[in-house]
Image (cartoon, rainbow, N blue to C red):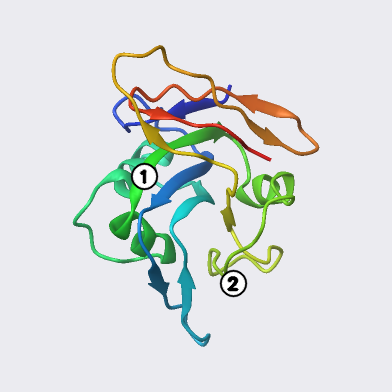
């Protein structure tokens, strides 16, 4: 079962993969070992990751959603500079399979992935056609992230955002 979570409170402590949605409101300079620095423009990005250690998806996503953490992984720089909008979870899933399913999305930085991955160009993708707007007191809209090949349609249910677009 695939769910979208805006907080880590009720995410199951299962091993699996996730797609983390991050909004950057300003330019962010990203440095990756042995590569020149790259600049990410403001906008929405999707990061595909996995959580197979203790605490599984719950522990990994709680860390990504927390501010003030030590920078351990490439994505930590983005989650500290931007706003984590939430994450879709795929218990038992594989992060590289998610990247492949989302391969129709642009890659903003080559090599932005887990250090042991040699299969993917990047685990960071640009979700270009997403319009983020704050609302209050309105019905929650449905957002659909269409994942090519699998045709997964995932509802978005955050209280304070309207999303329109996808792929």
Residue that carries the numbered disc 1 in the rendered image: 84
With 167 as the anchor, is 14 left or right in this view? left
Callout 2: SS: loop
Q: Identify the residue shown where x is 60% and y is 44%.
A: 129
Locate residue 11: give its quadrant: top left
Please give left or right for residue 74 compared with residue 59 in the image.
Answer: right
Identify the residue at horizontal 48%, vertical 19% (top origin).
141
Q: How crowded is mark 1: few (under 14 residues within 10 Å), some or many (20 or more)?
A: many
The quarter of the rendered structure image containing the C terminus is top right
Quadrant the N terminus occupies: top right
Residue at horizontal 43 percent and vertical 66 percent from the top: 74
Callouts 2 and 1 close, C-beta under 8 Å: no
Residue 38 appears at what percent x and percent y? Answer: 49, 77
- 110 sits left or right of 11 in the view: right
Q: Can you identify the residue that label 2 sits on?
A: 111
Quadrant in the rendering for residue 10? top left
Residue 64 in picture, x, y percent from top left: 34, 49
- Front-most of 121 and 60? 121
């Amino acid at each position: 079962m695939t769910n979208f979570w805006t907080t880590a409170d009720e995410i199951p402590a299962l091993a699996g993969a996730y797609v983390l949605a991050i909004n950057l409101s300003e330019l962010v300079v990203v440095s990756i070992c042995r590569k020149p620095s790259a600049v990410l423009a403001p906008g929405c990005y999707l990061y595909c990751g996995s959580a197979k250690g203790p605490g599984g998806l719950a522990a990994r996503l709680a860390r990504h959603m927390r501010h003030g953490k030590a920078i351990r992984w490439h994505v930590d720089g983005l989650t500290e500079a931007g706003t984590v909008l939430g994450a879709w979870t795929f218990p038992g899933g594989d992060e590289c399979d998610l990247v492949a399913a989302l391969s129709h999305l642009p890659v903003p930085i080559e090599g932005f992935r887990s250090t042991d991955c040699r299969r993917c160009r990047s685990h960071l993708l640009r979700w270009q056609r997403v319009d983020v707007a704050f609302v209050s007191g309105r019905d929650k809209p449905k957002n659909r992230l269409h994942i090519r090949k699998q045709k997964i349609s995932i509802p978005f249910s955050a209280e304070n955002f309207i999303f329109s677009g996808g792929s």
